Image (cartoon, rainbow, N blue to C red):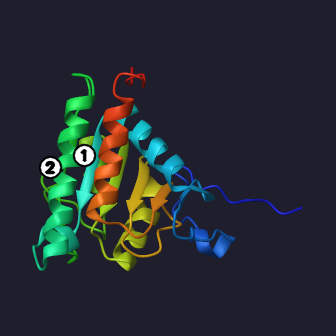
Amino acid sequence: MTTHYKVMPGPEHFLPPAAASMGNSLPDPGQGHIHGSIVPEEQAMEEAARQFLSAKVPTIFPGPLVLWAWNEKAAKKATAVRHLFETIKDSVASTQTPMLIPMPDYRPKYPKINPEIEINPNHPNLTIWHNKIDACMFVGVHCHQANLSLKIIRGGTNCYTVAMCAQAGHEDAMLSFRDATADKILRLADWVKKLKGSVEPPK
């Protein structure tokens, strides 16, 4: 009998396995994945919106690929990310605290970072612990850095991770999209708006 490895919120343990090494595969175009299972992209959109709306501190972590306007496509994605954040802010209860925390670069920052204003892929748990983040989305982060962050987060925190990937997706996230465009980010914002008021806020 084959068992399916579920990518779930942690803390899992000190060194969680790479989901790919456990047999999890990436979605095809038009698909996403939730907890390692391949699903239609719209189902993943709805679930991501529900996670944002039910979190105490729903947070977006934009990386260098959208933070720096190095081409027109990046600038459009950045505008879409901002729209998604504003939509989340407008759609949650007053007891929830949406955040937008950048990952401006990938250099390790020792002896410490300022977790109130940045996240770093080498120790993302510090930002998540400090701000008590329980659901987050990575967007515009290079794949190898996103994978590093996602494993650390799964190993040491209970944060629900969403990855909006411009390539093939991230099997180490709890929920992942592939082929991210500005339009896809705006579609996620539409799902948040559509579900506003229908998802019970956290206690």
Specify the amino acid type for callout 1: His
According to the picture, the residue beneath numbered tag 1 turns out to be 130
On screen, residue 41 versus residue 128, left or right, reads: right
| Image quadrant in which the C terminus is located | top left
Q: Are marks 2 and 1 in contact (CB under 8 Å)?
A: yes
Q: Is residue 137 visible?
A: yes
Identify which residue is drawn at 55% across, 64% down. Answer: 16
Which quarter of the picture shows residue 48?
top left
Report x, y in % for residue 28.
56, 70
The Cα–Cα distance between marks 2 and 1, rounded to whole angstroms, is: 8 Å
Foreground residue among 121 and 137: 137
Q: Quadrant of residue 190?
A: top left
For label 1, the SS is: helix
| 76 over 49 or under it: above or below | below
Which amino acid type is shown beneath numbered disc 2?
Glu
Q: Nearer the viewer, residue 166 or 25?
A: 166
Disc number for residue 116? 2
